[in-house]
Image (cartoon, rainbow, N blue to C red):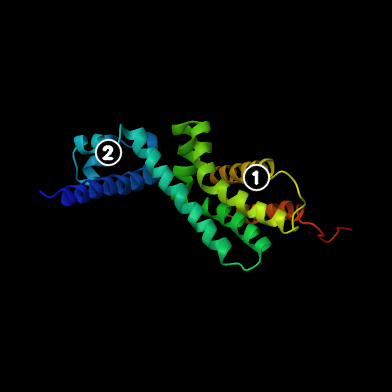
Amino acid sequence: MPQSTRAQQREQTRQALLREGRRLFAAEGYGAVGLAEIVSAAGVTKGALYHHFAGKAELFRAVLEQVQQEVAERVAATAEAEADPWDQLTAGCQAFLTAGTDPEIQRIMLVDGPAVLGWNEWRALDEANSARHLEEALTALIEAGTVERQPVVPLTHLLSGAMNEAALWLAASGNAGDLADTTAALSRMLEALRVGRPQAH
């Protein structure tokens, strides 16, 4: 068998494991899904799974990374649809909260993610995806004078932490109306950063 064909088959096997693992983790939760169920759904052997992943936790980590990258791309696409840099920031932040209300994303990224990987590793993955875009947006706004000049790293961590906490709370609340209240509160919080904002009376 040619090398390229073997490589394609390996990649197809990996993608099948990711696809079925993601579907099962989203539907049943990490704890309820067994390896036998995953390999059966993907139509491969346990040996094939172990060729790609050390076990269920490593497969879940790869699925989580995929989900976080998709959320980051969705946030970036929403932000880039706006012409004004300030509107890009607010639209991107609201898109992140909205994405977190998707049941599949909630289960994998917000409920099981921190529990399976531990808080530190979960945060490192989040930082590599969503937080990097946030830091770039804030840096541009500070340089443009829209946001007061200040160290961008602590500001990024404060906003990212607030949004992650809000997303975790929304995932647990299950109340559809809470999203509108949360995005309104986020808008007010962001508005307080803006230089020359209208003063409240």
Disc 2 crowd rating (10 Å Cα; few below 14, some 14-19, many 20+) is some
- Asked if one can make out residue 136 in the rendered structure from this viewpoint, the answer is yes
Q: Which residue is at the front of the view, 57 or 9?
A: 9
In the image, what residue occupies the spot 57% across and 46% down?
A: 131
User: Can you name the residue that lies furthest to the right here?
Assistant: 201
Residue at 31% x, 49% y: name it: 19
Tell me which residue sits at (27%, 38%) in the image: 52
Residue 126 position, x and y percent, is: 52, 42
Is the residue marked by circle 1 packed among few (<14), some (14-19), or many (20+) residues within 10 Å? many
Q: Which of marks 1 and 2 is nearer the N terminus?
A: 2
Q: Is mark 1 on a helix, strand or loop?
A: helix
Please give the residue where the numbered disc 1 appears in the rendered image.
156
| Residue marked by disc 2 | 52
- State whether residue 65 is above or below residue 73: above
Q: Which of 156 and 90 is in front in this view?
A: 156
39 to the left or right of 158: left
Q: Give left or right: position of 86 versus 33.
A: right
Q: In this view, does 36 lie above or below 191?
A: above
> Type of residue at label 2?
His
Q: Where is residue 123 in the image (x, y as percent from the top left)?
A: 53, 37
Q: Nearer the viewer, residue 122 or 182?
A: 122
Residue lying furthest left: 1
**Is residue 29 in view?**
no
